[in-house]
Image (cartoon, rainbow, N blue to C red):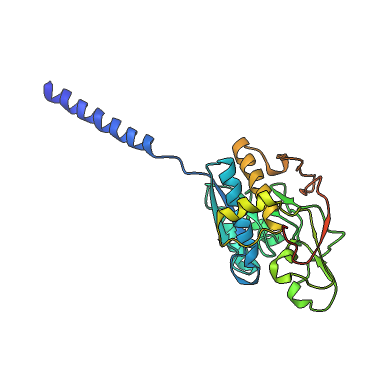
Amino acid sequence: MIQRFAFYLCFALIICSLLSACAAVPPTPRKIALLAPFEGQYREIGYEALYAAQMALQETQAHYVLLPLDDGGTETSARERAQAFTYDPSIAVVLALGPYATTPQVQAAYGTLPVLLVGYWPSIPQSKNIAALSADLRDTLPAIPDPYSYAEQEFGGAEILSLPQFDGRKGCVVWSSAQPADEAFTARYKAMNTFAPPPRLIAPLTYNAAKIAIIAIRDHTALRDVALNGISFDEAGYWREAAKYQYGCGASSS
């Protein structure tokens, strides 16, 4: 009788220990993925976005993980990486920037993941789970040219032309819904990393995009239903109240 009691007691203690161990395992933190160029001729896009997104997470004290990933420099590689996101259930929102991570084919590869296109790129939001933090500039910029193929010609484009390598490009106009960062933003941004590239038009946009992503995760809300300081989205997925600003090429934050 005593032996049987001892057996059941040991068995109960083992079960309790296993349950306690399981309970002690913390839940996997939710992730905000950042798919953008971090290598090649457009790498400034990724790094400017990276420090701005990190700043938003830090300032909001959001307990989410930022997962930056290089787009690979081609539409094919960006599509493969977008599809890989769908296998990670901890990824809650994707921020996509650059000419490759935002194309219709890559948007399809995100599946049902909420995706926020940060800035204006050639393709429109392809489905209800995708929004664009930009005014609809299709009538103004029917296509974004390759800036490196235009030497003496006058041309215009979106935030890609705000990169430092296009400083002072003659006859070149940048169209964007971003306003240059003020001194306070620039100081906080530079404090993230002394080697961070100068915050131009992409940094303020990504900062707000990260905040929108945080709200969407926290409140279990679709991206297109989030409202943030005058930012909301229309039926096509574009920033409803966005202005259309013009800047010179290499538009800076100061």
Q: Nearer the viewer, residue 54 or 224?
A: 54
Quadrant placement of the N terminus: top left
Q: What residue do we see at 72% from left, 47% from top?
A: 128
- The image position of residue 196, as x and y in percent, is 59, 60
In the rendered image, which quarter is residue 24 located in? top left
- The image position of residue 47, as x and y in percent, is 60, 61
Residue 225 vertical position relative to residue 111 in the rendered view, above or below: above
Q: Nearer the viewer, residue 86 or 176?
A: 176
In the rendered image, which quarter is residue 149 located in? bottom right
Residue 128 vertical position relative to residue 219 in the rendered view, above or below: below
Question: Relative to residue 48, is residue 104 drawn left or right?
Answer: right
- The image position of residue 77, as x and y in percent, is 60, 67
Instruction: Report how many numbered discs are placed on residues in the image.
Output: 0
Note whether residue 84 is visible.
Answer: no
Q: What residue do we see at 59% from left, 49% from top?
A: 55
- The image position of residue 124, as x and y in percent, is 77, 56
Q: Nearer the viewer, residue 78 or 245?
A: 245
Note whether residue 76 is visible.
Answer: yes
